[in-house]
Every structure is written in structure tokens, then in C-alpha cells.
Amino acid sequence: MQNGKWDAAFEVAKEDNMGFDFENSPFGKEHFDMWSFTEHDNKYQDIFTGFTYCKSPKEFKLIDGVDSLIDSIFIKTYKNRVKKWQELGDDSYPLNEDEIYKVFGRKNVSLLDKIDSLSILINRWKEK
């Protein structure tokens, strides 16, 4: 959003975990840059009522999976569904129980790759 300008502003202000309305805010008057498919004159306040800023991108984590999503009871249902998908030609889901629990039965947390490119954008705004 805004090529890192907002993240830079929050970083300089040492603010995180906050929210505000776009109306009567300089952020709300910014061009809505999340839609780049056609030309438009929309501002953020035209699209959204407010904004929540929770963490700096440096703290972002990629989280997928849910602990205990698949248990010893649901695994039978899961295998039956996978067999149906395989009948339709989709063999991308595991049937081995160890692999099933590894992929779907626990929460996986990792840092985001390529965060450096976003940090460069943020730092450019901070240098101005």
C-alpha cells in the first residue's frame, strides 16, 4: 500500500497496533492504489471506512495449518474425500497418515521471504 509510505509513517511514529477512521484522516485522502486494473479517482475513504495497523512488515509471519485440525476421527473422512478427488484426477493430497498430520494437523509458522524489497521501499520514505 502506497509503496511503503504508510509503513514508514507508523515506523517513524513508533506506532503499531492501532486503528482509525479514514474520514478526516490524511490516509483516507490517498489515492486507492490497491486497484490498478482500470483508471479511477477513488480515495481510500471512498472504499473503506477505516484502517487497522497491527505490526510492521518486518514482523509478518506466514502461518498455515491448524493444530489438531485432523484428528483420529476426522482422518477417515479426510481419506474418503481424497479418494473421491483422486477419482476426478486430483492426486495432489496425501493419503499417508504421517504426511496428512504433518501437512494439515499442525500450525506451521515461518518468516516471509523477500521482505527486503518492502523494507527498501519503507526506508526510501524515511530518508525523505
Image (spheres, rainbow, N blue to C red):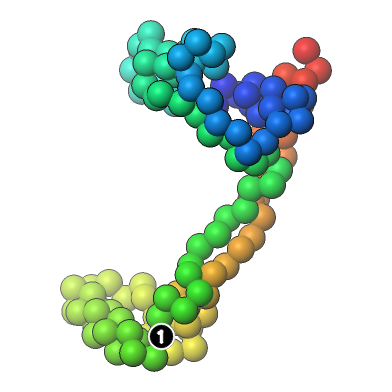
> What kind of residue is marked 1?
Asp
**Residue occupying image coordinates x 54% and y 69%:** 107
Question: On the rendered image, what quadrant is the C terminus found in?
Answer: top right
Q: Is residue 59 above or below residue 46?
A: below
The total of numbered circles placed on residues is: 1
Q: Is residue 62 left or right of residue 87?
A: right
- Give coordinates of residue 36: x percent, y percent: 41, 22
Q: Of residues 99 and 101, which is closer to you in this image? A: 101
- Give coordinates of residue 38: x percent, y percent: 33, 17
- Residue 11, quarter of picture: top right
Q: Is residue 66 above or below residue 73?
A: above
> In this figure, which residue is indicated by the disc labeled 1?
71
Q: Is residue 86 left or right of residue 120?
A: left
SS label for mark 1: loop
Q: Is residue 108 above or below residue 34?
A: below
Q: Is residue 38 above or below residue 86?
A: above
Crowd band around label 1 with a 10 angstrom C-alpha radius: few (<14), some (14–19), many (20+): few
**Residue occupying image coordinates x 42% and y 16%:** 45
